[in-house]
Amino acid sequence: MFATIQLRNPLVAVVLFAFFGSAISSSAWAQNADSPESTTWSSLKGDVFGQKFIEPANGIVSIEAPKRAEDAAIVPIDLHFKTDAASGRIKTVTLIVDENPSPVAAVFRFGVDAGVTHLATRLRVNAYSYVRAIAETEDGKLRMTETFVKASGGCSAPAMKNSDEALANLGKMKLRVFSSKSSGMEPMTRATEMQLMIRHPNNSGLQMDQVTRYYIPAHFIQGLIVSQGNRLIMSMEGGISISEDPNFRFEFDAKPGEDVKVEASDTEGKKFQDEWPLASSSL
């Protein structure tokens, strides 16, 4: 019997596939893992982007992921962006996992002068699938790159932590700042990298409680804003494909001496925030 799952986040509702049908597709992809096209994507892209034309990325955005994931519930994804004047500023990046029950994993928006050149996170991958990054530049053009990942069962994999531990640490955040290896010019300085970690179960709604045998309701971080001073660095609208304990590693143009602030919200209406000073010596 199929479970009925109600998800309140509109992003999650985009093209919600039947869970078991998605799982079956992994065997088909196993036989055709080198296919240059995805039948799923052909029907999906219109629902997400309408009639907009999508060009090849041509280096404006690139994506890296393991060809075969060690853990389908924690698949590392690395995105790199070109930010020169000829390419145009990237406004948003949409991250899609074709064969996931809810394919749109997240939509990231970048601040006007944030200069984000790298973003890494971890995804659940439910079946052999293409993972796509579609960047929108200031001129409104869409550019796409993709990679194929062999993984299965990531959206239904049991949580790594028990529910009591997860709730006790809900929303706790940690920010790591990695020292710059190259000098910059005031007042804008290249911060090598920052890593934001948020404690949250990010339940997908497809995981089963091993004691009660009922499905655990979906509960995940759906909104995220990272800012420095009064300017936006990036924001995210997330779905069920972001892994447990969301983790984001990013590189941007930092201003020495201005605090970094993070605000997050989840599907139960809970809000979390924290703030960290960014000393000049960190850059």
Image: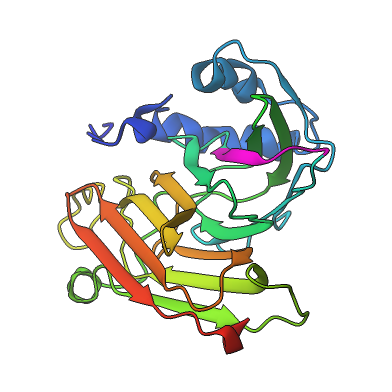
How far across and how far down the image is residue 207, in percent? 31, 52
The residue shown at (72%, 31%) is 143
Q: Residue furthest toward the bottom?
A: 281
Camera-side residue: 187 or 152? Answer: 187
Q: Quadrant of the N terminus?
A: top left
The majority secondary structure of the magenta stretch comes to: strand
Q: Quadrant of the C terminus?
A: bottom right
The residue shown at (76%, 80%) is 183
In the picture provided, is 90 more to the left or to the right than 218?
A: right
Exactly how many numbered labels are in the figure? Answer: 0
How far across and how far down the image is residue 56, in percent? 79, 29
Residue 154 in sight in this render: no
Location of residue 147 by image quarter: top right
Q: Is residue 87 magenta?
A: yes
Residue 81 in sight in this render: yes
Report the span colored magenta. Answer: 86-96
How far across and how far down the image is residue 266, in percent? 26, 52
The residue shown at (69%, 16%) is 53
**Depicted 84 relative to depicted 86: above or below:** below
**Depicted 247 relative to depicted 62: above or below:** below
How far across and how far down the image is residue 223, in percent? 34, 49
In the picture provided, is 281 more to the left or to the right than 16?
A: right
Q: Is residue 29 magenta?
A: no
**Depicted 253 relative to depicted 125: above or below:** below
Location of residue 206 by image quarter: top left
In the picture provided, is 238 more to the left or to the right than 113?
A: left
Q: How is the image coloured?
A: rainbow
Q: Residue furthest toward the front?
A: 186
The residue shown at (43%, 59%) is 226
